[in-house]
Amino acid sequence: MNAPMSFKGQAGQIRERLVVIGNGMAGCRAIEEILERDPARYAITIFGAEPRVNYNRIMLSPVLAGEKTFDEIVINDAAWYADNAITLISGDPVAQIDRRTQTVIAQSGRVEPYDRLLIATGSDPFIIPVPGKDLAGVVTFRDLDDVDRMLAAAENGGAAVVIGGGLLGLEAAHGLSLRGMAVTVVHLMPTLMERQLDEAAGWLLKEELERRGQVILTDADTAEITGKDGHVSGVRLKDGREIPADIVVMAVGIKPSVALAKAAGLDVERGIMVDDHMVTSDPAILAVGECVQHRGACYGLVAPLWDMCRALADHATGSPTGYEGSVTSTKLKVSGIDVFSAGDFSGGDGAEDIVMRDAARGIYKRVVVKDDRLLGAVLYGDTADGNWYFDLLKRGEDISGIREALIFGQAFASGGAQLDPNAAVAALSDDAEICGCNGVSKGKVVGCILGGAHSLDAVRSSCKASASCGSCTGLVESLLAVTLGDEFAGERVEKTVCKCTSFTHDDVRRLIIEKELKAIPQVMQELHWTTPDGCASCRPALNYYLVCAWPGEYVDDQKSRFVNERMHANIQKDGTYSVVPRMWGGLTNPRELRAIADVVEKFNAPMVKVTGGQRLDIFGIKKEDLPAVWADLNAAGMVSGHAYGKSLRTVKTCVGSEWCRFGTQDSTGLGVQIEQSTWGSWMPHKFKIAVSGCPRNCAEATIKDFGVICVDSGYELHVGGNGGIKVRVTDLLCKVATEQEALDHCAAFIQLYREQAHYLERTAPWIERVGLDHVKAGLFDDPDSIRKLAARFRYSQSFMQDDPWAKRAAGEDSELHQHLAEVRPLEFVS
Amino acid sequence: MIGDWLDIGPVDQIAPGNARTLPVRGGEEIAIFHTLDNQFYALVNKCPHKQGPLSQGIVHGTIVTCPLHNWNISLKSGEALGEDKGCVPVVPLRVDAGRIYLLREAVVVKKVA
Ligand code: SRM
Ligand SMILES: Cc1cc2nc3c(=O)[nH]c(=O)nc-3n(C[C@H](O)[C@H](O)[C@H](O)COP(=O)(O)OP(=O)(O)OC[C@H]3O[C@@H](n4cnc5c(N)ncnc54)[C@H](O)[C@@H]3O)c2cc1C
Ligand code: SF4
Ligand code: FES
């Protein structure tokens, strides 16, 4: 307009006019970098939407938490603008860029011409489009005004709901809770900060925040923000739960602020497209910060912005270098909680996880290594080495020389020649504590070993080290190796659960109860799992142990179940499923048979067969059709036969005294009663029962896990039979007089097996391992044992006897049965 | 860019630790995995051993254990791990702004064995 095209600077040369949109972190840093290189080059004007000077946005969290004041987080005060002859136009956002006349037009109508324009508009908070999002009391967390709104709300105490369990959300939650509000975090995903943390670290974080009194709801999808008189009153989740709230903080993510650039016709995808010199599709216009997209990436952290600003200033002052993208690392700014993550920790081919856990100190460390380079790191509880790992990662340093010691951190890894993990233990002082439970020092353990305790068990019994929780087992073994050298025989004989842990099945089962461990990630942390999320062997085992230990309390982890148990049907070699409804004691009736016949026809099942377990098996059902098949079977009164589960399978019976000329008791009736009291129960392995009406044993009860042979005077109870790979005939357990006693003994025996056997151990190998006497002692030594065990079994059954088919038929977990979509290419390349 | 990639919907259709399937008419069914570390991968849904449906296996790290005979298959390369030998085609996948995209030309391939 009428402003001069250029004006003369002090040195007399013509200054180009540089206009900056955005008085934020990137915009101002870019100016600082330019001034450092060539203070006389540009006449600078900065527009800022916020009515204040430039401040450190990341410190808004400490301001909210009351740890800092606004004055303390100002980066450039008014004097800085004056000293550098920068015109700051704050509180007046730019409304339009006119590229033809090279001017920007502010909301107030002010027009400012430019030779060069720098767009640094940052990001806008993402608002989820739910009803109620515009109510008063719904705030975002982006600038000082947002903080002021939160502080005003917190003054009256009350309840806050934070939607979003990422970095921003958790920092907001922390601040509000320090300010005295009752805080609930609502997070869509199953783990907190899932973009930066793995399951193990996310779980530890959740535990700690809960300990501090926050309520953390994961897998929680917001349906609506409810209001009263135009002000927010709460949040309703899709599952129906309602959480009252006086303030709702929406912290679900950010999106680059690109509206101005888009309207001006610049190339914009997710962010404003820039080249390596931060130049947009218009050579006169630069862009920097969260609003840009560089080589396909948009960033939401400051470190990459600093690199961008350097490249921008180099270019803008005539000595271009170029920006090549950034690797980022994350820290959470919540006092007392140390979380760090960097790089790629998805592992995979040739990549190896090195995990270290210290349950007593709440530490989880994981580094991912591939081809002698560090790929990523997740640290929880002790982040002192975060920067060191990040540095190794960014520089792509060859870590082969320090590999063994890498996980112990910089101090140890750089410590010198001794890189054997045993050396870490050797380097400990004599009074360093080895076993926290029993307070045993290194000196004492070594003394024991020198005194003749040459094995782990010997150490355990002589000085108690590692005899309690066992988490120091690795340390004690290292001490044995260091002290005895070649004389140490090496690892223990008893097998561990899998390669992810040094604990045995018995250890794990005992510690789950002793330490009240109630979630898979918790077991993995407390028992020092060496992998981040276990493997296909330990996950199902842990899931079972937890189901068994905490009936009604533990939430079954579907993803840790083998396909058959997840789908409630048996997978076949062609990927279809077979369906076996329960036929109590092998009995059926016209209604059931008709329903089965109808299902076979309706779903075109290619085969239906009588099984070796006295029931019918329908083959060739597609996973999509399973819920409909089950609905039809349910309608005729049939429930899941669990032919797929590590659970009660069948109860076979013979005709018994009702019809058979040799029958001594009602074997059919007893079989039905037994099946009705035991179906639905999860076990270490599958469990089969049979009841025969006389010793002719037509139901083959003496090769079953639990078998009953009826005799004139009562019932012989047999256990530990197996007709499978290795045939084993049952052992006689005892004889009882009444049906009720038979039922009680059956329940008690099952519970003993459930509580004591290893996962995937059937009763036959279990009894071979522990001995029949051990089983008898468990059942009979205390006269009250049968009653107590049976009571525990029945309590557990009160949660288990819930037909899984009916739930699926009603729509539960429908995504397990449905395809995502179908691709139908118009034309096929063949 | 968009034209080369097939949008198959939002990421939250697949819970972490799970997989879902995408039948391709005249082509191979694809399995899309969501790991516990929040990564997404896509493979042809056929185990290199005996064509087991990998989508139904247990996912741990970036590995899926085949439901039929427990081969471990890398989600990143499709290679069988450990002693087992074989490889299943990988379908290039990217996640952008909360949606999953598959490389169109890799989806529309003729049937493998
Ligand atoms: C359907 C059936 C065969 C039939 O058509 O009769 C059958 C089918 C299978 N049996 Fe069986 N078994 C069947 C009765 C038996 C019996 C007989 C019995 O129960 O009286 C035995 C020997 C008795 C025993 O278990 O002690 C039997 C011993 C096995 C074994 C070996 C178990 C062992 O401890 O050695 C396996 C393998 C395993 O479990 O690891 C097995 C595994 C299987 C599996 C689940 C194989 C698998 O992992 O996919 C088969 C599933 C087919 C399917 O999709 O339905 N099946 N299986 C029978 C179903 C009975 C039912 O109504 O639920
Ligand atoms: C609470 C909080 C905590 C954070 N913690 C961390 C952390 O710990 N570590 C980390 O690395 N990062 C953190 N971040 C992210 C970090 O603050 C951003 O990456 C950084 O501020 C981005 O800089 P920027 O200049 O691109 O955007 P901003 O700093 O947002 O600056 C953009 C400025 O442009 C202004 N603007 C927008 N449109 C216009 C217009 N039309 N006219 C005039 N002005 C306009 C905006 O008002 C804003 O002041 C945090 C962010 C927040 C909100
Ligand atoms: S005997 Fe073998 S082939 Fe026959 S059903 Fe049992 S597991 Fe399958
Ligand atoms: S088909 Fe996958 S392991 Fe056999």
Image (cartoon, rainbow, N blue to C red):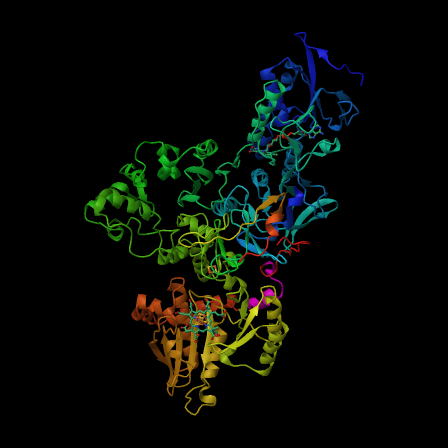
Residue extending farthest bottom: A661
Q: Residue at x 52, y 53 (%)?
A: B17
Q: Which residues make up the magenta segment?
A: A802-815
Is A751 on the left-hand or right-hand side of A187?
left
Is A642 on the left-hand or right-hand side of A750?
right
Is A138 on the left-hand or right-hand side of A59?
right
| Number of marks in picture | 0
Which residue occupies the foreground of this view, A585 or A103? A103
Is A564 on the left-hand or right-hand side of A86?
left
Does the stretch in magenta take in A389?
A: no
Q: Which quadrant holds the C terminus of chain A?
A: bottom right
Q: Residue at x 29, y 48 (%)?
A: A465
Q: Is residue A158 above or below residue A116?
A: below
Does the rendering let one see residue A246? no
Which residue occupies the foreground of this view, A72 or A522? A522
Q: Which quadrant holds the N terminus of chain A?
A: top right
Q: How far across and down, in percent of the image, does residue A192 sit?
A: 54, 45
Q: How far across and down, in percent of the image, does residue A308 sit?
A: 59, 27
Does the stretch in magenta take in A807?
A: yes
Residue extending farthest front: A830
Does the rendering let one see residue A537? yes
Q: Is residue A179 above or below residue A472?
A: above
Q: Is residue A58 above or below residue A110?
A: below
Which residue occupies the foreground of this view, B48 or A706? B48
Q: How far across and down, in percent of the image, does residue A818 sit?
A: 61, 60
Q: Where is ligand 1, by quadrant?
A: bottom left
Q: How far across and down, in percent of the image, does residue A532 sit?
A: 45, 47
Q: Quadrant of residue B98?
A: top right
